[in-house]
Amino acid sequence: MSNSHTLSIGDVAARTGLAVSAVRFYADEGLVHPIKSAAGHRYFQRADIRRISFLLIAQQLGFSLAEIAEALEPLPNHKAPSKRDWDSMARRFQKTIDERIERMTELRNNLNACIGCGCLSLKQCHLYNPEDRAHQFGTGPRYLQGDKPY
Ligand code: FES
């Protein structure tokens, strides 16, 4: 049973709006680190709610569990992170966010150039890919990733 310092998995589920199975999944993935009792029950700290809140938002923004795990990795596992721990983690993750914003802005700009255009220009279009010429640059949407179609 939880006490004033720890939370049961049901408490965490209720507080975060997740199903108990989802909290268990995040624990199994190493994104939160509950303490296991001798009876096999998992107990969480209040700070785990903040960890889960962060990971839910990061997931909604399209970050993978691997990216989120990497962001959370510097935080201590079995004690509440200090303000300094959170600040350090936030500074590191901010670089990841900035890179993502840069890539999304480039993607938006490339797509905006095509919306309403319809030219499918061999020289400038990021969507037109006759005979899969983009494949010479590698796999994936090469022109949308920055390779030039000429
Ligand atoms: S359709 Fe004209 S640039 Fe893509």
Image: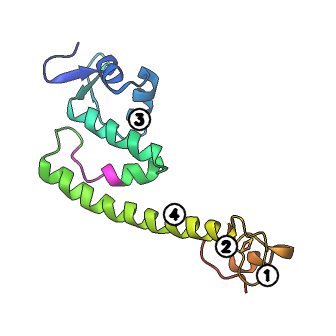
| Sequence-first disc among 2 and 1 | 1
Query: Regarding mark 2 in the picture, which secondary structure is present there?
Result: loop
Residue projecting furthest to the bottom: 150
| Sequence-first disc among 4 and 1 | 4
Q: Position of residue 29 (x, y in %)?
A: 43, 39
Query: Regarding mark 3 in the picture, which secondary structure is present there?
Result: helix
| Sequence-first disc among 1 and 3 | 3
Q: Residues within 10 Å of mark 3 (few under 14, many from 20)?
A: some
Query: Regarding mark 1 in the picture, which secondary structure is present there?
Result: loop
Q: Residue 104 carries which label?
A: 4
**Residue drawn 54% across the image and 70% down it:** 106
**The residue at label 2 has a CB less than 8 Å from ligand 1:** no
Give the labeled residue for mark 2.
142
Q: In which quarter of the image is ligand 1?
A: bottom right
The alpha-carbon separation of the residues under discs 4 and 1 comes to 23 Å
Q: What stretch is highlighted in magenta?
A: 71-76
